[in-house]
């Protein structure tokens, strides 16, 4: 359901920053999830906004590989498309301050928390990722499907894992790494906590290298593929 513009970690520049989108041809709307440093260029090269009337951007956190080219996208919507996009983030004041420092004026875009956003049902989940900034994952209901999108997370919230186990999540997007660190979920740990029967629902993403991707497949998980 979600289409990926990039599926790499911060340092995996060859495959691009992890980012995806959902396009609805009926109302010509797009929901973009994250807009890291390399994402705006990929959006423009693919002419992704050529037939779009509504642009919504859901941000997981403000590390540059997830929000670094968001200011450029907002400028493009304003000056190129004459569209006022909506930026969705749980902490409106935080992201407003971030965008103000990049020169994006508040009247150029709309801000909404997940609770305020109306196009899709979105619920945020606080993630263990960084001790310096907050990070969020999301539960989204799109076209009758429930989607979990981890963003960047060192672990999986027990409530979210239980929803997967009892069949309440249709697509489960999880960042993975082969390294032991406090920022992302180790692929071996994912293998320990996800039951084999549920692995066809888990789509691994945010790869640090090709080895991690191949190991995910060997363990029975799916992998996010870029267009």
Image (cartoon, helix red, strand yellow):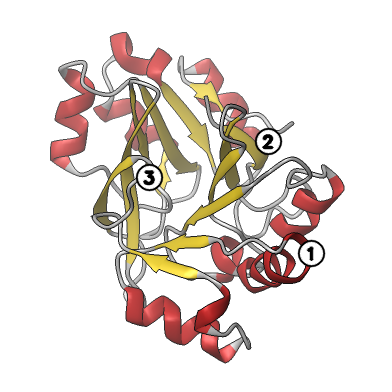
Label 1 SS: helix
Q: CA distance from mark 3 to mark 2?
A: 20 Å
114 or 196: nearer the viewer:
114
Residue name at image x 63 percent, y 37 percent:
4
- Look at mark 1 in the image and give the residue it sits on: 80
Q: CA distance from mark 1 to mark 2?
A: 36 Å
Q: Is residue 137 left or right of residue 220?
A: left
Residue 179 image point, x, y percent: 48, 49
Q: First in sequence: mark 1 or mark 2?
A: 1
Q: CA distance from mark 1 to mark 3?
A: 31 Å
Q: Residues within 10 Å of mark 1 (few under 14, many from 20)?
A: few
Judge depth for marks 1 and 2 and give the one in front: 1
Judge depth for marks 3 and 2 and give the one in front: 3
Badge 1 vs badge 2, beta-carbon distance below 8 Å: no
Q: Is residue 130 above or below residue 7?
A: below
Label 3 SS: loop
Judge depth for marks 1 and 3 and give the one in front: 1
Residue name at image x 42 percent, y 13 percent:
200
Q: Is residue 64 above or below residue 3?
A: below
Q: Is residue 181 left or right of residue 128?
A: right
Q: Residues within 10 Å of mark 2 (few under 14, many from 20)?
A: few
Q: Is residue 133 above or below residue 219?
A: below
Q: Please give the count of numbered marks on the rendered protein.
A: 3
Q: First in sequence: mark 3 or mark 2?
A: 3
Give the image quarter of residue 191: top left
- Look at mark 2 in the image and give the residue it sits on: 210
- Look at mark 3 in the image and give the residue it sits on: 150
Residue 189 image point, x, y percent: 33, 36
Residue name at image x 73 percent, y 59 percent:
40
Badge 1 vs badge 3, beta-carbon distance below 8 Å: no
């Amino acid at each position: 359901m979600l289409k990926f513009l990039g599926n790499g970690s911060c340092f995996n520049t060859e495959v691009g920053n992890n980012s995806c989108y959902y396009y609805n041809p009926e109302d010509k709307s797009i929901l973009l999830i994250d807009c890291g440093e390399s994402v705006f260029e990929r959006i423009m090269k693919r002419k992704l906004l050529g037939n779009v009337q509504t642009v919504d951007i859901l941000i997981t956190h403000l590390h540059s590989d997830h929000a670094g080219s968001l200011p450029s996208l907002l400028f493009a919507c304003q000056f190129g498309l004459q569209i006022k996009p909506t930026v969705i983030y749980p902490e409106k004041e935080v992201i407003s301050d971030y965008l103000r420092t990049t020169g994006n004026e508040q009247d150029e875009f709309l801000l909404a928390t997940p609770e305020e956003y109306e196009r899709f049902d979105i619920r945020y989940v606080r993630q263990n990722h960084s001790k310096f900034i907050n990070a969020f994952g999301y539960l989204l209901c799109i076209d009758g499907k429930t989607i979990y999108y981890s963003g960047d997370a060192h672990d999986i919230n027990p409530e979210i894992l239980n929803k997967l186990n009892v069949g309440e999540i249709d697509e489960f997007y999880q960042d993975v790494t082969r390294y032991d660190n406090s920022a992302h979920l180790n692929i071996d740990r994912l293998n320990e906590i996800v039951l084999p029967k549920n692995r066809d629902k888990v789509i691994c993403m945010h790869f640090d290298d090709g080895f991690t991707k191949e190991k995910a497949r060997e363990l029975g998980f799916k992998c996010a593929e870029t267009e």
